[in-house]
Image (spheres, rainbow, N blue to C red):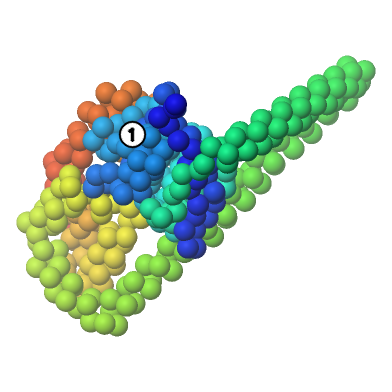
Amino acid sequence: MSKFKTIKITKGSGGFGGPLILTPDETKKYVISVTGGGIHPVAQAIADKSGAIAVDQFKNPVDKKETFCAVIDCGGNARVGTYPKLKIPTVDIKVQGPAGPLAKFITEDIFVSAVKVNNIEVLEDGENAEKNTAEVDQNATKQEYLKRKKELENEFKEKKEQEVSSKNPILKVIDKVGRAAGEFTAVFYQSGRETLENVIRNILPFMAFIATIVGIINYTGIGDLIAKALVPLSGNIIGLLAIGLIVGLPFLSPLLAPGAVMAAIVGTLIGQQIGNGNIDPSFALPALFAINGQVGCDFIPVGLTLGEADPETVTVGVPSVLFSRIITSPIGVLVGFLFSIGL
């Protein structure tokens, strides 16, 4: 009897996608947890109920060919669509729908969000058999459809080639110029549409979120407390170096990086203090480097996966980049300070 079991993962309250019905095997038997801070309980529950093995992708990276499913905690940046793009079933523990630059890859058949431990269940053998039969029928229908589609495309292509070959040279040139112009227009039209969709889906909601948070901070008076704590650090190069060092710590940077929320809020507060005259404007540039030392630290294992790096490379690369931020973050502050002299 196989040690692996089929599980069903459904979306949680307010979630998107699913249900995912998954079965690990000897080739794909790892549940990767890309959440920071060890193996997430949802990843462990998936592993326990399916017979797979849960691993922390930050510490023990697994090749995508061996990945059964990925558990993430992304709120809408590029990471949320990375694993769906790689055709890896993705479980997001946050409430999240299609978003980010890879939103088109986030579909209900490979992605599910707002998942908690109680959203994972083991299917009985009868349900598995029914599922497998349905999958066979569906795959057969899909293969038949794809075959017929390819035949029609070939017929259309042959017909077009015959039409083009029968034209005189002048009409051929006109046809080529018109086709090239049409393709050029289509590319830029699609680019503009995707840009607007990205702005509406990702940038505007994030701006609204930051505006709300900053408004709450200022209304409750927390903003004044944070500002008073930041002014002594932000108004001199030693304090900015300290901020850069703190946000670059390996155990903090992956937690501070998602969504750039910390940098956006602290940056807004420092900007207010510069506008009020409490901080010299010449410290704006080094302050920018100081609060952004953690940027991208949550994306390192994902980026290496996209680059098809070997597991050994990922194992060395993730801690190397994280520890390097302790050095590069303060250096960035110093560079910003040197370039701001005289501003």
Q: Residue at x 38, y 71 (%)?
A: 211
Is 169 located above or below residue 242 in the figure? above
Residue density around tag 1, few if under 14, some if 14–19, many if 20 or more, within 10 Å: some
Depth check: give the residue in front, 32 or 97: 32
Classify residue 235 as left or right of residue 309: left
Confirm whether residue 84 shows in the render: no
- Quarter occupied by the N terminus: top left
Q: Residue at x 47, y 63 (%)?
A: 13
Question: Mark 1 falls on what kind of element?
Answer: strand
- Quarter occupied by the C terminus: bottom left
The residue that mark 1 highlights is 53
Classify residue 101 as left or right of residue 129: left
Depth check: give the residue in front, 302 or 137: 137
Depth check: give the residue in front, 1 or 32: 1
Residue type at the position of mark 1: Ile
Q: Position of residue 280 (x, y in %)?
A: 16, 67
Q: Position of residue 308 (x, y in %)?
A: 39, 26
Confirm whether residue 129 shows in the render: yes
Q: Based on the displayed image, in which of its 4 quarters is residue 309 positioned?
A: top left
Q: Based on the displayed image, in which of its 4 quarters is residue 227 positioned?
A: bottom left
Q: Residue at x 35, y 46 (%)?
A: 45
Classify residue 297 as left or right of residue 13: left
Q: Residue at x 19, y 33 (%)?
A: 320
Q: Position of residue 111 (x, y in %)?
A: 51, 46
Classify residue 197 as left or right of residue 342: right
Q: Position of residue 175 (x, y in %)?
A: 83, 28
